Image (spheres, helix red, strand yellow):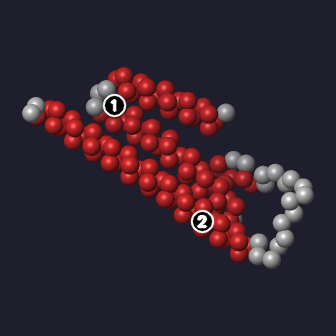
Amino acid sequence: MNRSALTDGQDDSIIDRRLGILLRTGVILSGLVVLIGGVMLLFECHGHMADYRTFHGVPENLTSVSQIIVNALRGDASAIIQSGLLLLIATPVARVVLSVVAFAMERDVLYVAISVVVLCILLCSILW
């Protein structure tokens, strides 16, 4: 067996494991953040009856990433839930970024280019 083929296979296996760990960690972390925010929201709204006859839209303090982070750090339950959802959205984006880095380290120009295109599409869909 060719030594370089063995090394490449091991490198791919390491990268696959790291990508798997990244995805699992992102999903679990975001789920925990949403759960914590949900429990806090339940305690804050205990005894209040929800009014579903009128639509109230998104509160002003939850319309931008910076506002969500600031309000989550202040302990606002809704902002904590929103930050958990932002973590969930950021997880696949981080996976693509890690893929770009891994392919660049392997000097695989084609897959770097494809991954960069995918990253651009993801970022454009999130930002616009």
Residue bearing the label numbered 2: 35
Q: Amino acid at mark 2?
A: Leu
Name the residue furthest right: 53
Give left or right: position of 98 versus 72: left
Q: Amino acid at mark 1?
A: Ala
Residue bearing the label numbered 1: 104
Q: Is residue 70 in view from this perspective? A: no
- Residue visible at 16% across and 32% down in the picture: 5
x%, y% of residue 15?
31, 43
x%, y% of residue 108?
31, 26
Is 98 rendered above or below residue 30?
Answer: above
Quadrant of the frame with the C terminus? top right
Quadrant of the frame with the N terminus? top left
x%, y% of residue 61?
75, 54
Task: Looking at the image, tell me whether mark 1 or mark 2 is earlier in sequence order.
Answer: 2
Front residue of 55/63: it is: 55
Q: Residues within 10 Å of mark 1 (few under 14, many from 20)?
A: some
Name the residue furthest top: 110
Q: Residues within 10 Å of mark 2 (few under 14, many from 20)?
A: some
Q: In what element is the residue under mark 1?
A: helix
Front residue of 6/89: it is: 6
Is 49 rendered above or below residue 54?
Answer: below
- Residue visible at 74% across and 73% down in the picture: 44
Front residue of 118/49: it is: 49
- Residue visible at 17% across and 37% down in the picture: 7
Which label sits on residue 72? Answer: none
Q: Is residue 57 in view from this perspective? A: yes
- Residue visible at 28% across and 31% down in the picture: 106
| Whole-number angstrom distance, CA of label 1 to CA of label 2 | 37 Å
Q: In what element is the residue under mark 2?
A: helix
x%, y% of residue 64?
69, 47
* 1 and 2 marks in contact (CB < 8 Å): no
